[in-house]
């Protein structure tokens, strides 16, 4: 130690560490406060008797009394205090700047946390911010971020920055000793170590990181006490759970940003950079190539960008390909484990990470988390309460423990890794056979919730809020898929309930399925219908008819007329037996559509008229409007534009009164076709654009494609061939994504339009316009189509032989 620190200074510091005034200490020693002041200011040395009294009060060990008295009397050097294993270390009271730091050296460099690091440094620069909690699930990188943060803050804190690991502590009572040890502070004597530490910290200006405090929550009030008595101190805490202290500033730590599945330039993402860096530690020759980078991105997505998951996955590159690693993770998260001896036990596998969080939950929290694992793609609060019995308080608690996420859209979600582990607890048979029943009850509640949602959506998709409902269904699409799959494949004995629920859930969503090209919805329905037939399950006739009718419309959309006709024949027979007007009307409308597509417009109109006669008594404006629009489509095909305009206008009026945006768009589309028949080019283009705007708002891609087709044709007919070809080129990208090809009259009109465009453009200009359309894509084409000015006169005014009136109504 340095000899510039005297015995008097040492004694004064020890007295203050005992939280005693000079008067109180003098009274305990048995001397006057004046005499004590002179000793502390080195004006005098204590007598041998007084030195012995000082030793008694300070708790100096018997074997060290002689040395202590000699030092106090000036008969021995002060260095004796430092070298003694028993006497308090005088070096503790050197200038604060000489205190030793305790920051561990990380095994890896920090990758991809630049924005988080900058935000934390800014927060620490705020005088009001004295307690920051880095909150996130295990393995997300909180500790690594904390180490980096305090490392770059060394110069800002006069008395240093320190790192205190709490992971190994099993009781809050050891927090004080852990902090003291990290600071190099050794309490002495019989005085409370907490008081001594608080007194020591009182005048310090330092930053202390407390790592992994989530299992010591009963002791977090200690942090508030430390901050209260130490105005120059700031704390950076890592935890899987919020501390819920008034001074706390919460900083949520998430996984690294993930490249989307469609992105090819994944090397620009830090999560991929981290994987490559870690992979090279086990296989130095590992590089990111065109062949493996998609699989590396897939691995990163599979672990939700969790750094620990990336590290555990990268360790396998020495024996497996990236594709094999991704497959293993997606099918068995227990695959992510390591045998590295220097890896903390709680981080040696993702299961260990989850188990550490699991044991910190109450029984009710565990039960709710198990049940929430049935959700896919997030959920709303009412769904969580219905399916899992999750109150707002429980959801908030699980959020604070970093097991549930709250999204900006107001939805809740589980980290995928957490969801998989929670699901294993739901399916486990470890609790005397009761868990299997719990799993069935939970999945049944999940199915019933989404059945109710689907049936409500089936009505709302015809109303004023259909755009919002389509968005709601998009958000819940993964949950709907999970429910349908479970209903079809579950081994529960109640097959009838499962099949009926599955058909009832899928059937009302035909407008939703239609907007997504219909293929998926058709597959679900046909699987359910097949199971019903194969297993001789008897569901109500109305349920089967609705399923057949919906499936037939989706098959029709894919030009599979044979399947459409077969399903509708059966549906018509069953519906007439039921004698329920609405069910019969639905089938008649579908039969009319099929006849229309097959060119039998007289038969189509006959079906539509009978459908309308059954619709009118119901006073359902949307369905009446749809029947009227169908009659208008058939009338246009027959060249009866007056009849077509009459029913379209009535249908448009009813659709507007009902607020049914899609029916409004369909009526406008039909009126556009009437305008074409009357050689009113500008009116036709305006109606098509009005319809396109609504279809685009509703995200009904199939009908967007039809409108773009019409507007492309109109552009060519009005002398804007380059624009028309560009719209066709863009529209092809949409059709390809929908897996829908041109058919019937649509193909004939395209061929006629292309011929006309070639008469206006040379081959190079035609190809350039087409490629420009491919480049901007269909979304860009929609914007251009809605902004463009249409000409006043079509180049082919007598062309009414090829019609595009048909849009799917469902």
Image: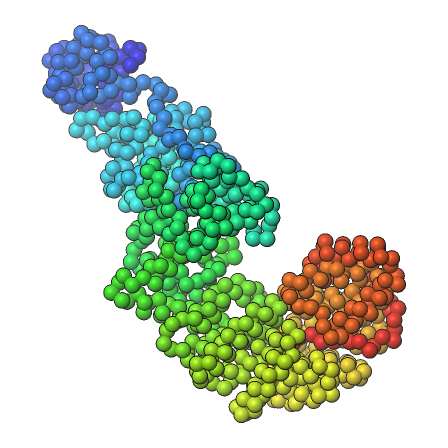
Q: Nearer the viewer, residue 759 or 697?
A: 759
**Is residue 314 at least partly visible in the picture?**
no
**Is residue 237 at least partly visible in the picture?**
yes
The structure residue drawn at horizontal position 35% and vertical position 28%, both measured from the top left corner, is: 102
Q: Nearer the viewer, residue 103 or 205?
A: 103
- Asked which colour scheme the image uses, the reply is rainbow
Say above or below: 789 vs 172: below
Work out which quarter of the rendered image holds the C terminus and state it.
Answer: bottom right
Answer with left or right where residue 643 lies relative to residue 578. Answer: right
The structure residue drawn at horizontal position 33% and vertical position 44%, both measured from the top left corner, is: 346
Q: Position of residue 519 (x, y in %)?
A: 59, 70
Answer with left or right where residue 757 lies relative to residue 623. Answer: right
The structure residue drawn at horizontal position 12% and vertical position 11%, both measured from the top left corner, is: 48
Q: Position of residue 166 (x, y in %)?
A: 31, 38
Answer with left or right where residue 676 lies relative to residue 48. Answer: right
Q: Nearer the viewer, residue 570 or 127?
A: 570
Residue farthest to the front?
319
Say above or below: 449 vs 546: above
Say above or below: 87 vs 151: above
The structure residue drawn at horizontal position 33% and vertical position 40%, both measured from the top left corner, is: 344
Q: Position of residue 311 (x, y in %)?
A: 43, 42
Q: Position of residue 480 (x, y in %)?
A: 49, 67
**Figure quadrant of residue 722:** bottom right
Work out which quarter of the rendered image holds the N terminus and state it.
Answer: top left
Total count of labels: 0
Q: Nearer the viewer, residue 532 or 673?
A: 532
Answer with left or right where residue 540 lies relative to residue 441. Answer: right
């Amino acid at each position: 130690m340095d000899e510039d620190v005297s015995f008097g200074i040492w004694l004064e510091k020890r007295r203050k560490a005992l939280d005693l005034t000079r008067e109180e200490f003098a009274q305990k020693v048995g001397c006057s406060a004046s005499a004590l002041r002179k000793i502390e200011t080195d004006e005098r040395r204590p007598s041998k008797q007084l030195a012995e009294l000082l030793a008694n009060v300070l708790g100096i060990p018997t074997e060290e009394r002689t040395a202590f008295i000699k030092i106090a009397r000036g008969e021995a050097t002060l260095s004796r205090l430092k070298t003694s294993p028993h006497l308090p270390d005088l070096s503790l009271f050197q200038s604060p700047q000489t205190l030793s730091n305790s920051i561990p050296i990380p095994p890896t460099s920090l990758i991809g946390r630049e924005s988080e690091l900058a935000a934390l440094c800014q927060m620490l620069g705020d005088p009001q911010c004295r307690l920051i909690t880095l909150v996130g699930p295990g393995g997300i990188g909180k500790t690594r971020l904390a180490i980096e943060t305090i490392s770059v803050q060394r110069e800002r804190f006069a008395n240093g920055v320190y790192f205190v690991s709490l992971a190994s502590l099993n009781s809050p009572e050891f927090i004080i000793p852990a902090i003291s040890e990290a600071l190099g502070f050794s309490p002495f004597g019989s005085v409370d170590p907490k008081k001594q530490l608080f007194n020591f910290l009182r005048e310090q200006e330092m930053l202390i990181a407390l790592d992994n405090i989530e299992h010591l929550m009963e002791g977090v009030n200690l942090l508030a006490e430390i901050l209260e008595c130490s105005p120059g101190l700031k704390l950076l805490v890592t935890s899987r759970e919020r501390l819920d202290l008034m001074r706390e500033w919460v900083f949520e730590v998430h996984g690294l940003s993930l490249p989307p599945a469609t992105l090819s330039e994944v090397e620009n993402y830090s999560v991929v950079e981290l994987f490559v860096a870690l992979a090279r530690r086990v296989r130095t020759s590992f590089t990111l190539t065109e062949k493996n980078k998609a699989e590396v991105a897939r691995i990163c997505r599979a672990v939700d960008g969790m750094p620990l998951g990336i590290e555990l996955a990268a360790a396998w590159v020495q024996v497996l390909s990236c594709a094999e690693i991704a497959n293993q993770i997606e099918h068995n998260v227990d695959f992510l484990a390591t045998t590295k001896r220097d890896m903390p036990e709680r981080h040696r596998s993702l299961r260990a990470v989850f188990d550490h969080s699991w044991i910190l939950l109450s029984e009710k929290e565990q039960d709710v988390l198990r049940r929430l694992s049935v959700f896919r793609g997030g959920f709303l609060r009412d769904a969580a309460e219905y399916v899992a019995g999750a109150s707002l308080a429980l959801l908030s608690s699980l959020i604070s423990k970093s097991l549930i996420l709250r999204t900006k859209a107001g939805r809740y979600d589980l980290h995928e890794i957490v969801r998989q582990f929670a699901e294993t607890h739901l399916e486990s048979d470890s609790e005397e056979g009761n868990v299997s029943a719990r799993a069935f009850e939970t999945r049944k509640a999940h199915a019933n919730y989404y059945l109710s949602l689907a049936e409500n959506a089936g009505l709302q998709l015809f109303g004023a809020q259909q755009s919002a409902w389509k968005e709601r269904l998009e958000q819940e699409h993964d949950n709907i898929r999970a429910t349908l799959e479970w209903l079809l494949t579950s081994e529960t004995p109640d097959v009838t309930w499962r099949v009926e629920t599955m058909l009832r859930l899928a059937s009302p969503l035909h407008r939703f399925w239609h907007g997504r090209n219909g293929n998926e919805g058709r597959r679900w329905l046909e699987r359910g219908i097949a199971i019903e037939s194969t297993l001789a399950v008897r569901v109500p006739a109305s349920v089967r008819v609705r399923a057949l009718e919906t499936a037939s419309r989706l098959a029709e959309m894919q030009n599979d007329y044979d399947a459409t006709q077969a399903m509708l024949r059966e549906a018509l027979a069953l519906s007439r037996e039921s004698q329920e007007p609405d069910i019969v009307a639905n089938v008649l409308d579908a039969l009319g559509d099929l006849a229309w597509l097959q060119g039998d417009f007289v038969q189509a109109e006959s079906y539509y008229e009978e459908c309308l006669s059954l619709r009118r008594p119901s006073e359902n404006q949307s369905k009446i409007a749809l029947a009227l629009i169908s009659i208008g489509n058939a009338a246009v095909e027959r060249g009866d534009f007056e009849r077509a305009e009459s029913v379209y206008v009535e249908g448009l009026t009813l659709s507007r009164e009902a607020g049914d945006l899609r029916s409004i768009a369909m009526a406008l589309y039909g009126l556009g076709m009437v305008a074409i028949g009357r050689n009113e080019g500008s009116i036709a283009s305006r109606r098509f654009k009005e319809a396109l705007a609504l279809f685009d708002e509703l995200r009904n891609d199939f009908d967007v494609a039809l409108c773009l087709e019409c507007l492309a044709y109109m552009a060519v007919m009005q002398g804007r061939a380059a624009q028309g070809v560009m719209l066709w080129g863009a529209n092809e990208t949409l059709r390809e994504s929908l897996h829908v090809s041109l058919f019937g009259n649509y193909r004939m009109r395209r061929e006629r339009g292309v011929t006309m465009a070639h008469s206006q453009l040379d081959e190079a200009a035609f190809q350039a316009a087409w490629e420009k359309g491919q480049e901007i894509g269909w979304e860009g084409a929609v914007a251009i189509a809605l902004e463009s000015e249409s000409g006043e006169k079509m180049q082919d005014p007598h062309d009414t032989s090829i019609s595009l009136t048909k849009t799917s109504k469902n």
